[in-house]
């Protein structure tokens, strides 16, 4: 099931630094970011791809259903990282103005990896 991990974060008078290193349970093969969102995104799960989501600015909500459990995760701090497993059907919604969602993926893009049907 999806869960939040807190990234190692260090701050001083110069600002704050969060690190994504040796914390993801997969090798990063692809990353992308989503911004200027005007409607709900996602609505799928994957056969192989695992993901890590970080809202690096602003906030958004991630709805997750793994076939048994349903959760809504609020990503509102850049040190909060949501780990999604392949079985986690998810949508991304309620983006605040100026929000940017960074996504790390374990696989390269493959349209055949997507499962669009939601769990019942």
Image (cartoon, helix red, strand yellow):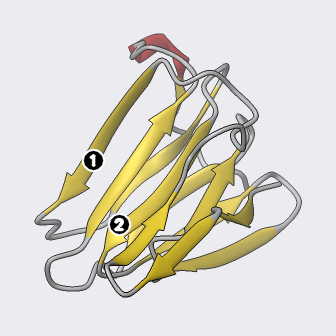
Locate residue 52 relative to residue 65 in the image: left or right.
Answer: left
The image quadrant that residue 85 belongs to is top right
Residue 112, x across and y down, in percent = 48, 12
Residue linked to disc 2 = 56
Residue at horizontal 58%, vertical 24%? 106
Secondary structure under badge 2? Answer: strand
Quarter of the image for the N terminus: give it: bottom right
In this picture, is 16 found above or below 81? below
Residue linked to disc 1 = 33
Quarter of the image for the C terminus: give it: bottom right
Say if mark 1 contacts mark 2, CB within 8 Å.
Answer: yes
In this picture, is 4 found above or below 23? below
The image quadrant that residue 82 belongs to is bottom right
- Answer with mark 1 or mark 2, whichever residue precedes in sequence: 1
The image quadrant that residue 63 belongs to is bottom right
In this picture, is 46 found above or below 10? above
Separation of marks 1 and 2 at Cα, in angstroms: 9 Å
Residue 65, x across and y down, in percent = 71, 60
């Amino acid at each position: 099931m999806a869960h939040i991990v807190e990234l190692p974060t260090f701050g001083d008078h110069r600002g704050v630094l969060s690190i994504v290193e040796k914390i993801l349970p997969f090798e990063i093969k692809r990353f992308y970011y989503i911004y200027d969102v005007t409607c709900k995104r996602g609505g799928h799960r994957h056969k192989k791809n695992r993901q890590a989501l970080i809202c690096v600015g602003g906030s958004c909500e991630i709805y997750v259903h793994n076939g048994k459990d349903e959760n809504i995760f609020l990503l509102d701090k850049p040190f909060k990282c949501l780990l999604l497993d392949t079985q986690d059907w998810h949508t991304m919604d309620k983006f605040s103005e100026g929000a940017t969602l960074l996504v790390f993926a374990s696989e390269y893009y493959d349209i055949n990896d997507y499962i669009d049907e939601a769990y019942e």
